[in-house]
Image (tube, rainbow, N blue to C red):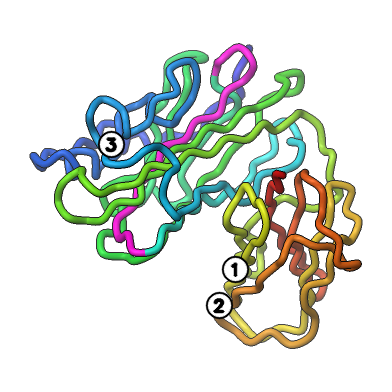
Amino acid sequence: MSRPTRHLAPFAAALAVVSLVPTALLANSGGPIDGRAGDPPAFQTCKDAACHNSFDLNSGDGSLTINGLPAGYEPGTVYTLEVMIADPGQSRWGFEATVIDAAGDQAGDLAPVDPSLVQVSQGSGNARDYIKHRSAGTFPGQADGASWQVEWTAPMAGSGTASFYLAGNAANNNGSNAGDYIYTFSADIPEGDTSSIDPTQLAQNGVQLSVFPSPVRSDATIRLQLPSDQDASLMLVDMMGRQVRALRSGFFAAGDHLIAWDGRDDRGIEVPAGVYYSVFTSGNTRTSGSMVVVK
């Protein structure tokens, strides 16, 4: 597969960053080694190799997701995505992600939005890239969750389905690798725009929208971060852009908002499994975040 031209020169200095702190936890605070995103064929994470292995994989009370994934990608389009991890009581965070095609080669390009928090290990040729946290991006002492923004440039036309693999570490910041929970997330994004909703997760007006947990089995929470007061509406739509549930409309004050969704449509019926979007509309600007509902 031919790969699109890369534009990662500004981040080249970030690729060799390694922490020299001796403890197991801090040894990876500068970023895990490549191949720990839960990707095939090894499906390894930081739980493997006797590292953060206090608990079984995905056994905690937390969640891990990528917000802003499109239902279908437009070749060459740049998508701003948000990696989001949450786990009550934990207070240090990390992640590694990659995106591959059916042959196991890199699908498109990954780049950090803020290279002080996120870095990329770039594979040679068609080999996989791994995007991951930096030391500053572990947010030591930050309670209950963290998020990182990354950019994905979708691959060229004819590349087929792009598969995202993500592993996250919800650590307890105790200076060792004990007591940490590892979570995984994966998603297959087919080629072709199958949704009428703009998948960009961060709108130009500064509105930030995220949905957790994902996948959703029953209830979900939509988080809005608004830079100013707005008259707006929030609704849930399906992949065709059809309204599923009107969640709220009217005045939204500046700041953070948490809006609960009970997994039901406007008729009070549980929605079937599939991909849905929460859409915040303010004037002519629309911001959306995707969620996957499983049954």
Whether residue 137 can be seen here: no
Q: Residue at x 86, y 49 (%)?
A: 196
Query: Which is more N-terminal, label 2 or label 1?
Result: 1
Picture disc at residue 57: none
Query: Which is more N-terminal, label 2 or label 3?
Result: 3
Q: Residue at x 38, y 42 (%)?
A: 182
Q: Which residue is mark 1?
A: 223
Residue 198 x/y as whole percent = 77, 52
Q: Which residues are magenta?
A: 89-105
Q: Residue at x 91, y 67 (%)?
A: 267
**Magenta span has 98?**
yes
Q: Which residue is mark 2?
A: 256
Viewer-nearest residue: 203 or 21: 21
Which amino acid, mark 1?
Arg
Q: Are marks 1 and 2 in contact (CB under 8 Å)?
A: yes
Quadrant of the image occupied by residue 109 = top right
Q: Quadrant of the N terminus?
A: top right
Q: Is residue 70 above or below residue 123?
A: below
